[in-house]
Image: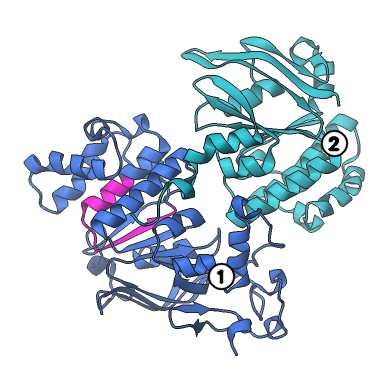
Amino acid sequence: MNTVLEVMDLNVTFPTRAGAIRASQQVSFRMQKGEISVLIGETGSGKSVIGLAVLHLLPEAAIISGKINYNGREILSMSEKEFSRFRGRDISLVPQNPSGSLDPLMRCGKQISESLEIRGISNLKQSTEVENILSNLQFSDPKLTAASFPHELSGGMRQRVTTGIALASEPKLLVSDEPTKGLDYSSRKTSMKMFLHLKHIRKDTHLLITHDLDLARMIGDTIHVLYSGEIIESGPVDEIFSDPHHPYTEGLIAALPRNGMKAMPGMCPGLIDLPSGCYFYSRCPYQCEQGKTIHPAIIPVNGRRSVRCHRFSR
Amino acid sequence: MSSVLQVTNLSKTFGHGDIFRDVSFTLNAGETIGLFGPSGCGKSTLGRCILGLEKLTKGSVLFEGKDIFRLDRKERSCLQAKMQMVFQHPEVSFDPRRRLIYSVTEPLVYHEKGESEYVLHSLLPLIHAVGLHPGILDKYPGQLSGGELQRAMMVRIYSLSPHLLIADEPTSMLDMSVQSQILNLMKEMQKKNSTACIFISHDPEVMQVMCDRIGVMSEGKCEIMNKNNFSEWMQPLLVMDTMEKDH
């Protein structure tokens, strides 16, 4: 089997004065070559923490346990020096805030060709390669974009340029953190088109972190829904959207404006004092008896799917 | 029904050119009009002009029959208490150095010269109605989530029972499930108070749920459509419909 990334029982805790913040608990998933896995969840669900862990970028204060295997090598226990050979070459990040991630004093084309230089592509070939990348990113005039400074581009265009920088290093694993956050409707649509196009022509292994359900549905293969630091449901995208098992996933889908915008009651529990039973119990429409006291384990359902809910445990 | 707001031939020009020209519409009590357009098309500027936060270049804004730009300061202040705005970034809309309780009671204390504690007591039903725990008001804005802050903003705004509410992308920074909570809350509050509302957004789906009529802004013009025309107009824009999942 061609497993590129395997995350096993990842626990990340941040000690604070108010108590330990359990940002990620028992997170396990694996990604095959060419697969797009989506981590979906709301603010504070711990999705970015997983992305940071894969990139070896968690702050030193974090207490980490578990394993992350990248192509058979365990990366969590690597030293910073060892891992720096992977970051930006084998594993690339599309950061969350494109405006803050680009160098304001450097033309966009130059910023992309920096990654090409690392790959050892000669100066002569760089500019055609940059234009090639930019046209794949749905830019209508790649030459013009390459010659522009970041402030001359719109938010959506900057987002696509940062994606270009990540792709220029030909990563074996691409991690993107909220690529459509803060974009207006038309830029968001163009970004989605770009990702869809990239999926068809490049077949990257892509870990997508987002709260944008449409984006997940459009380009994802597998989806992992996160709630309060845990994966509560995983499975193929189509199945999760057509037949969600966990009540939280159901609620998320029903909250979309086109599905009637039904609101779930209550709020996510804080990550410091989590309830002892099911984390979703207080908001759950079913409220089963066990959920009050017993924390559900994640259980496989029908082979390809799994869910963390007592209703499926018998 | 009497019109709350009458906007006639509104134009705004900044140094580099027209932002919008000749925008006209009327708004009745309890009605919602949406302003839709991409970033930078002037939706927010139009909202700010109507409130009197920006000077107009041309045209007039009549709020309950009075031109806010022709009133003296005192009258204007009274009138402006009845027009309120919700901003896009709840986290910067509150004074970060003050406890929330101060910011939430401030409008009533200012406009009705009440005592802070007495005001808070009168606000309790409203605080419960938006789904907040009163204890949360002792915290600072930085300690709360975006959804909680936007709820507190609802208390602050509806404490003055406004006749006109301008919501400038109130949920674009919030998560999907929180967005549905806040929008449903806004709708409910609006119905209870029969507030007229101008809803600014760049999400056509949210627009359709929230608005009775929609003004589409592009290239300086604002074309007002009813709901059906808007759904026809935006059909080609919809993300899920235009892109086939499998090529």
Of all chains, the one bearing label 1 is A
Q: Amino acid at mark 1?
A: Pro
Which quadrant: the C terminus of chain B? bottom left
| B210 on left or right of B189 | left
**Residue A193 at x, y percent in the picture:** 37, 47
Q: Is residue A247 above or below residue B98?
A: below
Which structural element holds mark 1? loop
Which structural element holds mark 2? loop
Q: Colour of chain A?
A: blue
- Residue at image location 59% in from the left, 83% down from the top: A312
Q: Colour of chain B?
A: cyan
**Residue B47 at x, y percent in the picture:** 65, 26
Q: Amino acid at mark 2?
A: Ser
Q: Which residue is mark 2?
A: B161
Q: Are marks 1 and 2 in contact (CB under 8 Å)?
A: no
In reply to whether residue B240 is colored magenta, the answer given is no
* Residues in magenta, as a range: A162-178
The colour scheme is: by chain
Of all chains, the one bearing label 2 is B
- Residue at image location 80% in from the left, 44% down from the top: B189
Q: Which residue is mark 1?
A: A244
Give the mark toward the camera: 1 or 2.
1
